[in-house]
Image (cartoon, rainbow, N blue to C red):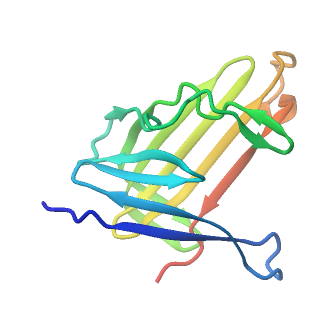
Amino acid sequence: MKVANKVFIVERYFKRKITDPWARINSWTIRRNTTQAISTEENLTFIKLIFPPARGKSWNGNIYLDEDIRVGVGGEFVQMYKNWNYRIENTNATVSTGAGTFNDCVVVRQADINTIIDRRRVFESYAPEVGLILKEMTILDGDGSGTNLPWEQRAKKGFIHTLRLIEHN
């Protein structure tokens, strides 16, 4: 299969409340070749998928960036990308979003790390002929205390973020 070397620009918009107007925040790019889907987000390049997708396949999706890079979160900095290991968890998942239910989805685990000082859990789901439909990110740092508490209560910094497709034509 020949895949064109097209680069698509994704214009990203944001609003806090349903009544707020949409505001453009930035642009990302996506492209694919015969073996990889590649995304550039905030000037960081990731290998999001490998082809053909097969359950259990893994790869270094962060090979193009310094995993020690510190990312600003709420006025503090976290090492988001340290020790990520991309792996295809499922190739025929059923995933529901606000835009409906999608079958035969590919689910990629980008990170699932749980130590006494940090929690990194990042999953993306891709639907055929649609693309990314769900992204779930938990990036939390603690100080090693309160290990009997859920991460949401013991975290000192970080975020939990979900992107979900809400409409598709």
Left or right, 150 with respect to 79, comes to right
In the displayed structure, 2 sits above or below 71; it is below
For this orientation, the residue located farthest to the front is 43
- Residue 139 higher or lower than 114, as above or below: below
The x, y position of residue 67, in whole percent, is 56, 29
Left or right, 56 with reference to 71: left
Residue 164, located in which quarter of the rendered image?
Answer: bottom right
Residue closest to the eye, 121 or 93: 121
The residue closer to the viewer here, 105 or 140, is: 140
> How many labels were placed on the picture?
0
Report whether 126 appears left or right of 28: left
Front-most of residues 101 and 54: 54
| Residue at position x 14%, y 62% in the image | 2
* Extreme residue toward the left, this view: 1
Q: Quadrant of the N terminus?
A: bottom left
Q: Residue at position x 68%, y 29% from top?
A: 119
Q: Residue at (61%, 27%) from the top-left corner?
A: 68
Q: Is residue 22 found left or right of 113 in the rendered image?
A: right
Residue 132: horizontal and vertical position, in percent? Answer: 47, 61
Residue 147, position as x, y percentages in the image = 81, 18
Residue 76: give x, y in percent of width and height: 84, 37
Identify the residue at horizontal 78%, vertical 31% (top origin).
151
